[in-house]
Amino acid sequence: MNHFARSAQSNSLKIMSIVRPFSNFEFIESRFKGISTLRRIMSQVRQHDGRTMVVEELVDSDDLRAENEDVHKRYPSCTTQKPCRLSFFSKPFKTLRGLRSATVDQFIGYVIVKTDVIPGGRSNTRVYESVVRPTDCENKFVRGSREYKCTVGENSFSVRGHLYAQQNNMSNVCAHVALRTAASCFHPDGDMSYREMNEII
């Protein structure tokens, strides 16, 4: 499996300024039910002087499609909203032309948010995956960072960092996420899908 959500195509794209007085918390509350993990990620983006966010609704990738199929085996009535990819830049721009001229050095990272509505109408919104450039800190050293390639619109960018993800508690749990983070450092495809883990088990 070599088609991951970070490189998936999108069927909608919106460019937004995230310079103050833009409120990360208000955006996350209104769009993504106030999930705290996304607040932390967008705070990291602000530390990198993030100025522009590109919001895309994704077309299903191989890994997203596999997860949906696995979830539906357990919960046939589960519905999934279109996953959303947020990409962050230190460059201010408002148009596709500005996006096309952005450089890798101006790309801070991305986060993919996925929402599943499970039986009983309960909504499960989570960070499906994210990679953000590490912040500079003299007293912090984390081994194993690698380069991740990401598509934004029709453009390709890369970011070096560590994969972060949350489990869905339906077809994967925290052990899956921990293994995925560790495996991303040496896996030949640069990442390991949850289905691949379950098939090995």
Image (cartoon, rainbow, N blue to C red):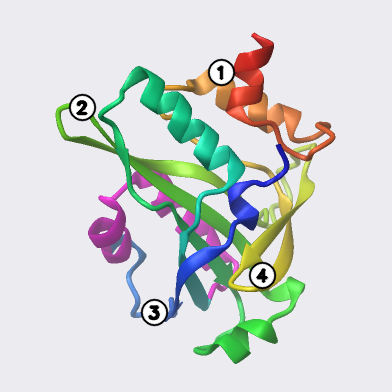
Q: Residue at x 58, y 49 (%)?
A: 5
Q: Residues within 10 Å of mark 2 (few under 14, many from 20)?
A: few
- Residue 2, given in percent of the width and then of the height, sits at 73, 42
Please, is residue 25 above or below residue 145 in the view? Answer: below
Q: Is any part of residue 186 visible from this angle? A: yes
Q: Is residue 156 magenta?
A: no
Q: Residue 35 in magenta?
A: yes
How much space separates mark 3 and mark 1, taking CA atoms?
38 Å
Number of numbered discs = 4
Q: Nearer the viewer, residue 64 or 128?
A: 64
Q: Position of residue 166 (x, y in %)?
A: 48, 34
Give the side of residue 151 with respect to residue 149, left or right. left
> Residue 192's image quarter?
top right
Instruction: Name the residue located 61 percent from the left edge and 89 percent from the top edge.
Output: 98
Q: Mark 4, mark 3: which one is toward the viewer?
A: 4
Dot 1: within a 10 Å radius of its alpha carbon, few (fewer than 14), some, or many (20 or more) residues?
A: few
Label 4: which secondary element: strand
Q: Closer to us: mark 2 or mark 3? A: 2
Q: Say whether marks 3 and 1 touch (CB < 8 Å).
A: no
Who's the residue at 75% across and 73% down the image?
105
Q: Is residue 129 left or right of residue 186?
A: left
Q: Earlier in the sequence, mark 1 or mark 4?
A: 4
Mark 2 or 4: the one toward you: 2
- In the picture of the structure, the residue carrying the numbered disc 1 is 175
Q: Mark 3 or mark 2, which is nearer the start of the sequence?
A: 3
- Amino acid type, residue under disc 1 in the picture: Ala
Disc 4 designates what residue? 107
Check disc 3 and report the residue beneath it: 20
Q: Which residue is mark 2?
A: 119
* Magenta residues (range): 26-50
Q: Amino acid at mark 2?
A: Pro
Secondary structure mostly seen in magenta is helix
